[in-house]
Image (tube, rainbow, N blue to C red):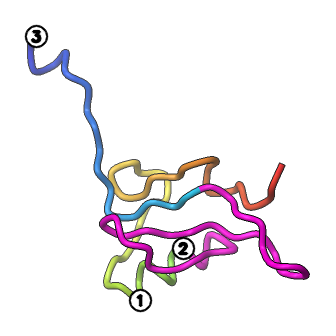
Amino acid sequence: MTEQAAPHISRPRIVVLGVCPGRQGEAPFRIVEMDGEVIGEARTVTDVLEVAAAHGITIHDLDDPDVVRWVGGGKYHWRLH
């Protein structure tokens, strides 16, 4: 197998997990992890940027899979189905 045939597997520092139901009367949220550790929860894309910045990571491109991995839906998915 040549180097070009090997798939690129990114390991982004920030992972945003799938949508979780909020408590009664609260909006759904997504858990944000950095380097495998839970660092907060987000209810909007802005929350993801703020949580990352609070831990020293500036995100310039939310669509870059080497920077952020979106699990269970992309950056515009914030509601339960």
Above or below for 25 versus 61: below
- Which amino acid lies under the numbered mark 2 shown in the image of this protein? Val
Q: Residue pushed farthest left?
A: 2
Separation of residues labelled 2 and 1 (CA atoms): 10 Å
- Which amino acid lies under the numbered mark 3 shown in the image of this protein? Met
Magenta segment includes 80: no
Could you tell me which residue is drawn at 54 percent across and 49 percent down? 71
**Magenta residues (range):** 18-47
Task: In the rendered structure, find residue 2 and report the number of the disc placed on it.
Answer: none
Above or below for 53 versus 67: below
- Which amino acid lies under the numbered mark 1 shown in the image of this protein? Ala
Magenta segment includes 31: yes
Could you tell me which residue is drawn at 81 percent across and 78 percent down? 23
Q: Are marks 2 and 1 in contact (CB under 8 Å)?
A: no
Q: Residue pushed farthest right?
A: 25
First-in-chain label (2 vs 3): 3
- Identify residue for label 3: 1
Helix, strand or loop at mark 1: helix
Q: Quadrant of the N terminus?
A: top left
Q: Position of residue 80 (x, y in %)?
A: 80, 55
Above or below for 53 versus 76: below
Q: Residue pushed farthest bottom?
A: 54
